[in-house]
Image: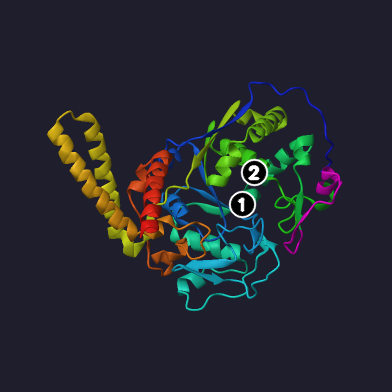
Amino acid sequence: MDFEAQSYEQPPSNYAFEITVDEDISLNELAEKTAQASVLRSAHVGNQYSSNVAVFEHGLPTVLYDRTIAPSNGPGTDRNYRPEVLIRARESHPLLEREEHPYRMATHLEIEQMPENLDERVRQQAGKYAVDLHLNSLREVFPHTPSQTHSHYLQRHQAVTAEMLDILGGDEDFLNSLNRRVSPQGTVSKLPEHADPARCVENYGWFGIDSDESGVIIPNQFNVLQYGVVEALETQAADVYHLSGPDMIKYAQQQELQHTLQQFYARIKQQASFADQLPETLRFHVVPTAHFKFVVPGSQQPELDELMQVCAWMEQSRQRLQQTRDSGEKTGLKSDLEHMHQQRDKLLENLGELFTDVTDKNRLSHYDSTALGGEGVYIHPDTGHMSARQAAQLYKELHKRYKKITKDS
């Protein structure tokens, strides 16, 4: 690759890469959209937490980003997914023999030990690398959910990705965003100070394109562009739906990123061999999934069912209270609501699992599925009907109440 930063004419204004945060759509609606549009959840490789379990249960295609750093005991490491451990039955089981293990890219993290007393169905998913275990186990639990790693995604779309990288290799802003590379051993380091980024790409190649073991790490902003372009090409649709957690939502809303992606997309539309297959305006819908968390261990299904029913009754009573002018009915509704408040609070006391932080090493994970010999994971059916906005509103309301109850007690 021979990169040389160039200046171009102002990109045509009719080429647009539009990022919007779409909160008014449900998991069920997204599942229906897979027939005519791209719907993709980008999670990280590792122990999948409850909201992701709900997403996967709905069969939504998934890419597991395997460019994170492990073990998760230092700055910049993946404390949400913890790929160096296996979380099961609310316990964290190390896959490494040493606690002070050198930091590695998740792609290079080898399994040094398997936890004892594991169900054989879990052991059967293990390969040489932790990535294999986490991916294979996910496929075992959700056989109807297409899932792959980011490495696999790059390999599948290597030609398109390589051409995009070649085109953007002439853009100074893109070159200046390159700052890290990975060694064949998996260690991650910054590019040499004052080094020419284009020369670094020529010397080291692209990690995941020129080599599966080492090279310059493709920056996050390109990953967003790539998902949009590749998925639009595959579906021949102008709308792409990308399901993400809070970090990606914040990142996608940055004005600087949106301006940069607009600029990059215009370059692709000007120069790519596949440009005619891309829409003039590509609409990249980012759907927040963090609050689809109405998920508990199987043993707590009755309590969660009752809680969700009480919440539904409360909402109906509130609406009726606003509508009625009958003073007697208002008195009765207020009494009913007070009783339901007490019932809700009593149920919440025993459902702390709903509010476990994703960084907790002893939380629920996909390894608790009965498909892997676990106690089971229960996803409330209403989770699929709620929009992302409705799920966030209800979850935050319950979490706020739970914190007050536990604080007072």
Label 1 residue SS: helix
Q: Residue 306, position in %: x, y?
A: 26, 54
Q: Which residue ends up furthest to the front in the rendered image?
A: 408
Image-based side of 38 in relation to 130, left or right: left
Q: Which corner quadrant holds the C terminus?
A: bottom left
Three-letter amino acid code of the residue under disc 1: His
Q: Is residue 321 above or below residue 154?
A: above
Q: Which residue is depicted at the point 31% across and 59% down?
A: 301
21 and 117: which is toward the camera: 21
Query: How far apart, in angstroms, are the residues tagged by discs 1 and 2?
Result: 10 Å
CB atoms of marks 1 and 2 within 8 Å? yes
Q: Which residue is depicted at the point 38% across and 58% down?
A: 406
State the extent of the magenta-drawn residues as a range. 183-201
Image-based side of 232 in relation to 197, left or right: left
Q: Which residue ends up furthest to the bottom in the rendered image?
A: 116
The reply to whether residue 267 is in sight is: yes
Q: Which residue is depicted at the point 74% across and 22% down?
A: 10
Q: Is residue 337 above or below residue 352?
A: above
100 and 48: which is toward the camera: 100
Tag 1 residue: 150
Few, some or many residues within 10 Å of mark 2 (<14, 14–19, 20+): some
Q: Residue 210, position in %: x, y?
A: 75, 51
Q: Earlier in the sequence, mark 1 or mark 2?
A: 1
Tag 2 residue: 223
